[in-house]
Amino acid sequence: MNTQLDHLIAKARAQDRSAVAKLLTHAESGGTEADYIDQHLTSTPTAPTIGITGPAGAGKSTLIAATLQELTHRNTTPAVLAVDPSSPFSGGAILGDRVRITPNQAGNAFIRSLANRGHPGGIALAVPAATRILNDCGFNPIIIETVGAGQSEISIAATADLTVIVLAPGMGDSIQANKAGLLEIADIFVVNKADRPDSATSKTDLEQMLNLRPQPDSQPPPILLTTATTATGIEELLDTINARLAHLESAGILAQRRSHRLHIEITTHARHLLNQKFDDYLTANPLPTDPAEPPASTAAKIINELLSNQ
């Protein structure tokens, strides 16, 4: 098995896109194969990861498509991880975000859809491992698009080097951003669909809200106006992303974020494994319909039993 995986990794590093796709499938599936692949990847990230998030309907996929075109003109080889929501009933996912990006728009980009499989925060559990695979295979930059759920999508800040919040005028997005905590995680704000007459008002609203909030970084997040359908403002967006990344690196913030990201990934996997063991326990030991103890005490006993059996 190791020989086969070593061969697959070598092919992926040679930009064999079929091999890259198979590595990503292993990362999604988890297990010993995924662990082996992860152990044999280059541990040092060289490609920046750019998170794209925001409410559904803001034009994230269209913005990414326009960005890919500009990146192709700049002779880069980008990759996109588009996270789609899984059904809470069937567990399936349409994986349709990449359908919105035509081959002409994608250029030489590698695009992969991932189901979030119920993982909270707008991303999938496999995204960090998938990012390492794409980094090891020479893709640069790596763009992560979240599911578009809106106010809960702040996990992207613990997954990407830089976070771009995409909003659209006329949707109350600036208020939603204030409620959701997106003001704290944004490195760059983009008011997309700027050809609408109320786009300037949305930008002003965001500027006022940012003035009311303390900023963790000395540089407040810039607010850009774009119209993705005509690629208006895309060059400025990429220039701003590069400048922002350079600032984060020189200030030591980028290294801190990447270190924090590893800690978050470890704790996330620990919680995921514990949830799996808890579900297995409940399958073998159904809870009583009328427990004699308070629910919190019952839960604590189960956790102690699970840990003592390890």
Image: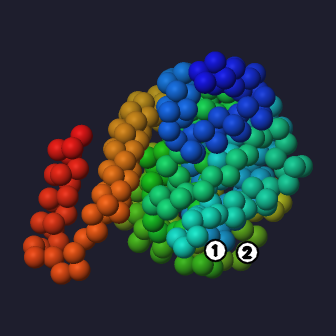
Asked whether disc 2 touches disc 1, contact meaning CB atoms under 8 Å apart, the reply is yes
Figure check: 231 above or below 2: below
- Residue 224 visible? The answer is yes
Side of 188 relative to 99 (left or right): left
| Secondary structure category for the residue under label 2 | loop
Figure check: 251 above or below 235: above
The quarter of the image holding the C terminus is top left
Side of 294 relative to 198 (left or right): left
The amino acid at mark 1 is Pro
Viewer-closest of 204 and 248:
248
In the rendered image, residue 39, in percent from the top left (x then y), is placed at: 50, 24
- Residue 225 visible? The answer is no
In the rendered image, residue 182, in percent from the top left (x then y), is placed at: 45, 61
Side of 29 relative to 68 (left or right): left
Q: Residue at x 54, y 21 (%)?
A: 40
Viewer-closest of 239 and 277:
277
Q: Residues within 10 Å of mark 1 (few under 14, many from 20)?
A: many
Viewer-closest of 105 and 29:
29
In the rendered image, residue 167, in percent from the top left (x then y), is placed at: 60, 66
Viewer-closest of 235 and 98:
98
Location of mark 1 (residue): 169
Total labels drawn: 2
Q: Residue at x 34, y 45 (%)?
A: 270
Question: Which one is earlier in the sequence, the residue at label 2 or at label 1?
Answer: 1
Location of mark 2 (residue): 196
The quarter of the image holding the N terminus is top right
In the picture, residue 192 is in which quadrant?
A: bottom right
The amino acid at mark 2 is Arg
Q: Residue at x 35, y 56 (%)?
A: 280
| Secondary structure category for the residue under label 1 | loop
Colouring scheme applied when the structure was drawn: rainbow
Q: Residue at x 32, y 61 (%)?
A: 284
